[in-house]
Amino acid sequence: MKKFSLIALAAAVAISSAAAKEIKIGVVLPITGAVAAYGQTAWAGIKLANKLEPTLKNGDTINLVLVDNKGDKVETATATTRLVSEDKVSGLIGAMVTGNTQQVLQIADEKKVPMIAPAATADKLLDRAKYGARVTFMDSFQGTSFASWAVSQGMKTAVLVVDQSTSYSIGLARAFKKEFEKQGGKLLKELKISSGDKDFKAIVSQINSLNPGLVYMPFYHPEAALLIRQARQIGVKSQFASGDGVSNDTFIELASDASNGYLYTDAFDSSNPPTAKSKAFVEAYAKENGDSNVPGFTALGADSYYLMIDAMNRCADGADRECVNKEIKNSKNFEGVSGIINIDKKGNAERSIVIKEIAGGKAMYKDTVNPK
């Protein structure tokens, strides 16, 4: 009887092994280029999540295929097309900034491949998409949440600096302005820059003369770091803040001591892990990197992977793109690294937001704002 059981067990294992297959997930991120810091931190999360959960419940192996889009729209389109047509991926993760993410979305919709964006926040990003989703918050929630919080903290006057060349900055600025004034705040002036600008003398001079309680700069870290340095050099004392575009160590390195006291919104703070999955991931990250400070984009990268895997596990076949896309949109109370996430029919995420302050060269937890 025992011999028969062992034979039966061996046969079952053999059948299971034979049935298990490889499922590929394509990852499109800026590993080099101007916004490489975003892609590298997100990739660290995706890669670690895959290491922690490399298979589906049925034994299928998940293999990641990473392509560097260099932060460029054309490179993004080319890379995504190659992943779908040549590598035959069953799902896509990427990109990071909104403009590049839109390229991934377009191809995902054309080829009917489920796609999850780790960090693109533009409100209308998923309005027409059928195969897209995201794990981060929208600009409207990010901007309004910080505006309301700022007024509650006594910041009653503000200067708004907008990068007119990016939809990310324009969307965040619009949301902030509307809520700030609604909450009784006074917007003293709106100033404009463009990506790639390096000389902000005229901008910081105007800020200095206006002396606002808050300077809100919803753009990416290269320009934000230069502007805050130039502002502090001429003695501007105002509180400065941004959105998640400065959520990386590169901003702190570029801004140096001028970054101290800087506020920004983020999706995650590793000193306050909100879920059991958060705690386990932070422990694994610390073991892997010798540092328990998990960047927000790393947590979002991991959540993009985990959400995709969770949806695949709810399908009879993890490679069934239609089923996976449907299950992603059906995700409710999903326990991610960055917190509890609910995905609506459009693929948008309802989730909390974290406010951080840089002190002594490190981002420190300040507060959490939950969706109402």
Image: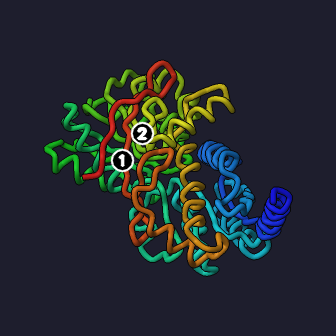
Which colouring convention does the figure follow? rainbow
Dot 1, crowdedness within 10 Å: few (<14), some or many (≥20)? many
Give residue 226's position: percent from left, percent from top. 51, 34
x and y, in percent, of residue 251 in the image:
54, 34
Q: Secondary structure at mark 1?
A: loop
Give me the residue at 74% from left, 60% from top.
61
Q: Earlier in the sequence, mark 1 or mark 2?
A: 2
Work out how far the residue at label 1 is from the one at label 2, CA to CA, in angstroms: 10 Å
Q: Is residue 276 left or right of residue 29?
A: left
Q: SS at mark 2?
A: loop
Furthest-left residue in this view: 184
Tell me whether the residue at label 1 lies in contact with that at label 2, contact meaning CB atoms closer than 8 angstroms.
yes
Q: Where residue 305 sits: x, y (%)?
A: 60, 55
Q: Is residue 198 left or right of residue 46?
A: left
Q: Amino acid at mark 1?
A: Ser
- The answer, for residue 80, to whether it is visible in the render is yes
**Amino acid at pointer 2:** Pro
Residue behind mark 1 = 352
Characterize the local packing of mark 2: few (<14), some (14-19) or many (20 or more) Cα atoms within 10 angstroms: some
Farthest residue toward the top?
A: 360
- On the image, the x and y values in percent for residue 64 come to 73, 57
Whether residue 21 is visible here, answered yes or no, is no
Residue drawn 40% across the image and 33% down it: 356
Tag nearer the camera, 1 or 2: 2
Residue in the picture at 23% in, 54% down: 178
Quarter of the view holding residue 104: bottom right
In the displayed structure, does residue 22 sit left or right of residue 122? right
Q: For mark 2, what is the residue?
A: 274
Residue depicted at x 70% and y 53%: 54
Observer-nearest of 24 and 163: 24
